[in-house]
Image (cartoon, grey):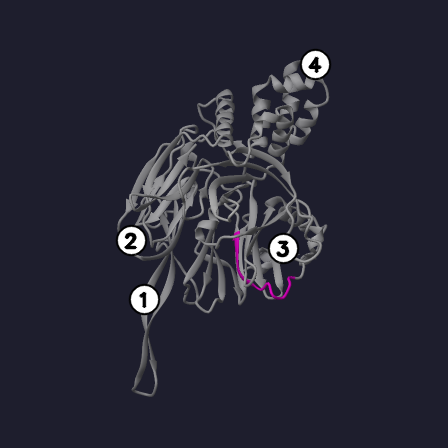
Amino acid sequence: LEELPEELITNILNVLGITSLIRCRQLNKLFKDTIDNNLALQYKLELAINGMEDGPPSPVTTAERLHILRQHRTAWDSMSHTSVQNIPSIRGYPWDFYGGVLARGTSTRGISFIQLPSLLKGIPQRTWEFLELGVEIQDFHIDPAQDLLVIIGGTRSRCVILLACDVVSQIILILRSSVHIRSLSSGGPHPSAQKSGVLRYKHSLQGHRFILNIIAKYLGVLFVNEDMSRKLVVWDWKRDVVVMEFYSDVQCSFAFLSERYILVAQGHSRGIIITIYAFVPTPASTGSTSPQLICQFHYPPIISSYEVVDILVTGLPSPGWTPPKHLSVPFHLGRNHRLISLSITFREGGNAIHTIPLSTFLHHIHRYEFGAAPSGCKISWDDWAPTNTRIHSWNHLFGYTHVRTMHGTSSIFFREHRDLFGFVACRHLTIEEYNPLAVRKATLEMKDSPDMHDSEEEGGEHTRMSGHPAWDGVFGTGSDDVSFPLRERTCSLGFPCWTEPIIGEDHFIVLREMGGQHQYQVHCF
């Protein structure tokens, strides 16, 4: 090996996968020195350890990207933001936070936007606003990478109920919904959508609550009606074509796993089930909007008193998502570096969160694709959940804010510490990160330097390999073995907050009160 040109060895090492590269580094001094002294190989390792991938070509060199990446990680590890700003919170209107853009409804027909800055990545702050979008806004969702603004608009129509032939018994107003595809930058119809910019559907759409998810050219909307029935519709929004319809009379939620597969979770009095469907029509199913069943993930029987009354699936950003190209970021979150989270509310007994790596579902999908598993196979709890998933209790109500408490493989929340009398003594902001490579690296570093570990009461970074038991036996026997490698950081903000914090790739946001007004306090990295 010593006789081979270093450039040849480097080129060979550069095409290896991360696992093989790490093993080579451990083989001997030659490989270790070669890898440690090569910027490209170091950058490749650091990207993998941090769950990132390289950004698009730009004048920023590999050495500069590696330096910025290390600064970015150090800033998050020490919770040392580069800037803080306060943004007024407009209560009573929908809002969204996606891809580093905070969008706030300002009226029933207006939205304002702020592209939050990142000094380390060179992302500037930008603000714009649409005062009149021409539609009554029920809800909306944004995707800055596609310059996409999806609006659920409402139209009130009169419905007359007759008691007899000529006697009016009741006049009620029905709010019918429509889906508008707009440009995030102009507010007009999106140039890639059909001319009208309004998606068609064969039946009238109604809902008093909505869940919206976007992945590339597909838009999924879950309409939750007042009778709690649910209708999930997936459109190819560029062609204005419905590719999937799904109806449920029990609690359900969904998340995209890829541009072909979708996860639907359902909960009722008899248990919880996760189903994976292929929603993109095949040549044999052209014209059908019924999804193809791929596999089902089962939970242990739930004790009858623990009836599921709500379930919410989170997996943001959508797998495969990358930042807008015009930002030319040096690096970004890996495309499949995601967690899928099920937030479950029980009629009696509180709430629980089950967190699962996206790779768990992709593994079983790949088995189906390669013929190792039949379509519609049922996967028992013991075959998918006891290792590498996490279940823990949650003592807060779930809401829309909760959807944004997770980003990629990181989650953010407040942890309360009580005194001997049961009163809240302090609240620490806590960020938990699932990343086996980062956890392994940090654990080794902490063994070498025990002083890195601060006490939780003082705040600081905590790294731990944790195996959390299932919550109070809700999932029955056999579920107490779930384990999850976590890296944890905490800090004290020094002021009270009333809602859950929000996290993104380069920011976290808390809602605080200043001078009697609620404001978003944005911490930028």
Local SS, label 3: loop
Q: Compare marks 1 and 4 and give the one earlier in the sequence.
A: 4
The amino acid beneath tag 1 is Arg
Residue that numbered label 4 is attached to: 4
The amino acid beneath tag 3 is Asp
Q: Nearer the viewer, residue 120 or 476?
A: 476
Q: Distance from label 1 to label 4 (Cα)?
A: 76 Å
Tag 1–tag 3 contact (CB < 8 Å): no
**Dot in front, 2 or 3:** 3
Q: Distance from label 1 to label 2 (Cα)?
A: 17 Å
**Dot in front, 4 or 2:** 2
**Does the magenta segment cover residue 265?**
no
**Dot in front, 1 or 4:** 1
**Coordinates of residue 18 in the picture (x, y in percent):** 64, 30
Local SS, label 4: loop
Q: Distance from label 4 to label 2 (Cα)?
A: 68 Å
Residue that numbered label 2 is attached to: 107
The amino acid beneath tag 4 is Leu
**Does the magenta segment cover residue 309?**
yes
Q: Compare marks 1 and 3 and give the one earlier in the sequence.
A: 1
Q: Distance from label 1 to label 3 (Cα)?
A: 46 Å
